[in-house]
Amino acid sequence: MTLQPGKQAAASATQDLVRFVTSATVDETAIAQSVSVVLDTLAVTIAGAVEPGPAALQRALEPDARGGAVPSFWTEASYRADDAAMLFGMASHVLDYDDVSMLTVCHPSAPVLSALLAVAPRGETSGRDLLEAFAIGTEVLIRLGQAMGFRHYALGFHATATLGAVGAAAACARLMKLDEGRTRHALAIAASLSSGLRKNFGSMVKSLHVGIAAANGLRATRLAAAGVEGAAEPIEREGFLHAFSGGETDLWPVGLTLGAPFAIVEPGFEQKRYPCCYMLHKMIEATLALRREHAVALADVAAMRVEMPPGGTKPLIHPIPKSGLNGLFSAPYAVIASLADGRIDLTSFTDPAVLRPDIQARLADVTVVEVAGTAQKGSDLGSAPVTVTLGLHDGRTLSRTITASPGSRQDPLTGPQLAAKWLDCLQRAQPALAREDAQALFTEGMSLARHGEVGGWLSRLRGSAARRQAA
């Protein structure tokens, strides 16, 4: 697949998207890749619910006792489908532990899966149906972002949120088996419901963006199914692409294809090893390696320097973090916490962890710079090196460069690491859940493509939360 800037297709991008959503075949490789990604996203969603943001959102939502309401994974309450999608979406992203696609600098899985979990008729949806809809929705999200370009992000939009509404609508339309006409209208409605500002990074609203995107994608599909109609070409010709690129592009680029291959297959999604902004991962990996290999601790270090690629510091907007959420986007904190604790995990980004006086006192000792050059974007940024240099009190200088992104195809999350992440996430939200029960749920989930219906497995996940409530 190649992008050819300046050469744009005359055919309707909207029509191509509609036909892809309704008719595309999802191959076995894409299905297999989707399984581990769905489990990874579901795990971080369950873990995220205990954070203050999703807890506050849950208090704002009205439980719904009517038949067809969507049950929560954490309590006995059920909710209207769009409210459930919002809650799942916020929980999926609040830890910043969900996967990334550097093709368009976004988190593709969270908004799409959150919408699908809320819309799926659980007694009727097979695992294969769910996985196909997931692969379709994430593909539309990512390729739409590639078509729009990186001007969108530079303008201040949160791409996961804006693209997520359309991707979620595509996934729901596929799962609901809408015809081409209603699918077109669903995409048109979702395009007008898309929103989200990067200014909210480091606050509860960043993860709420994902919930809003999931809810709006689901809502758009239901409105279209009920007969609400939109524009014939909402994507091109002064539509979504033009508006969200600040007028930089208007038509779908020639050479940018859907599903050939699916982005989830090549280059694949980057599943996170650490629960924070992806631009922190290489510096964390480098710092932990230096600490481990040279047996150094924070007290041994006088000064720290991080060299990032051009454009690499854009989302790292909290050099002096004042909360756990701020810490998710703080390069100085990532380096210092790695040295102080010898690990970065879910406990690293709580308010008490970030606000430790000995940590706060060292933030000014970290220098973060971008190397000279043109700002890099997307996959180029993802493959660019990051160097951490430590100046020790004894005069020595230690340095480590990391090029392969942790969790990428070049340094993937292994099967045991995925299972360990699943266990860590489930037990964070459900401390009374036995490890063997969590492992059994993971093993069952790994065969999701063969499930005749997904309701039983999802109910067992919910049941583990109910047991915690009763305990």
Image: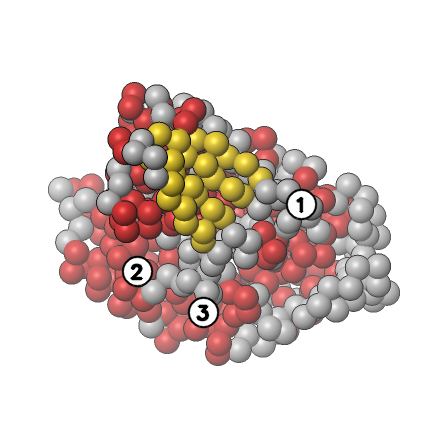
Q: Quadrant of residue 372?
A: top right
* Mark positioned earlier in the residue sequence (3 or 1): 3
- Closer to the observer: label 3 or label 1? 1
Cα gap from disc 2 to disc 3, whole angstroms: 16 Å
Label 1: state its secondary structure: loop
> At x 63% / y 74%, what residue is drawn?
260
Looking at the rendered structure, which numbered label has been put on residue 417? Answer: 2
Where is residue 432 shown, x and y percent of the image? 16, 46
Most extreme residue toward the front, as rendered? 395
- Image quadrant in which the C terminus is located: top left
> At x 45% / y 69%, what residue is drawn?
33
Instruction: Classify residue 119 as left or right of residue 298.
Output: right
Report the front residue among 411 and 366.
366
Where is residue 173 shown, x and y percent of the image? 59, 61
Visible in this render: residue 53? no
Task: Name above or below for residue 173 compared with residue 424.
Answer: below
* Mark positioned earlier in the residue sequence (2 or 1): 1
Q: Which residue is identified by label 3?
A: 33
Visible in this render: residue 432? yes
Q: How many other residues sit within 10 Å of disc 2, few (<14), some (14-19) or many (≥20)?
A: few
Cα gap from disc 3 to disc 1, whole angstroms: 35 Å
Q: Which residue is identified by label 1?
A: 373
Cα gap from disc 2 to disc 1, whole angstroms: 36 Å
